[in-house]
Amino acid sequence: MNLNQVTLPVNDIPKATEFYRRLGFLQIVDSPHYARFECPEGNSTFSLMLEPESTGSGATIYFEHEALDEWVEELISKGFEFEQLPTDMSYLWREAILYDPSGNKIKLYWAGDNRLNPPWRVDIQ
């Protein structure tokens, strides 16, 4: 089994698609109510669905990048505003936080081996 994609609700498709393209994602589907993006590395995709009343989904989307600090500096130079700059977290991830134009929370992070194999990992079936 493999996760296909995550879809975020947005209240303005043109504004949201421009935001995610500026973050570095390749837009592969474009319609008035739906957009889909490929991540620059790997095979992951995510999409946006128009929900005019949306003010954020309550969910958080995570994008991983090994050179997190450099990526955040690059995004700041492009005008992105962050709620939290890269910070070492107690759960062994380094994270920065920003929001898309519809209020969806985005965490840019690097966790290395701790992403799948933290010291407290369990394997329950």
Image: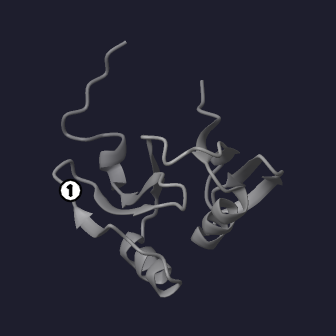
**Which residue ends up furthest to the top in the rendered image?**
125
Image spot of residue 9 (x, y percent): 60, 43
Specify whether 87 is left or right of 45. Answer: left
Residue shown at 66% from the left, 47% from the top: 48
Residue shown at 65% from the left, 46% from the top: 52
- Residue 107 drawn above or below residue 4: below
> Which residue is tagged 1?
89
Place residue 70 in its image quadrant. bottom left
- For numbered disc 1, what is the local secondary structure? loop
Q: Residues within 10 Å of mark 1 (few under 14, many from 20)?
A: few
Image spot of residue 75 (x, y percent): 49, 78
Query: Which colour assignment does the render follow?
Result: one colour
Residue shown at 37% from the left, 59% from the top: 110
Amino acid type, label 1: Met
- On the rendered image, what quadrant is the N terminus found in? top right
- Residue 15 drawn above or below residue 62: below
Q: Of residues 100 and 54, which is closer to you in this image?
A: 54
Image spot of residue 83 (x, y percent): 33, 67
Residue shown at 62% from the left, 51% from the top: 11
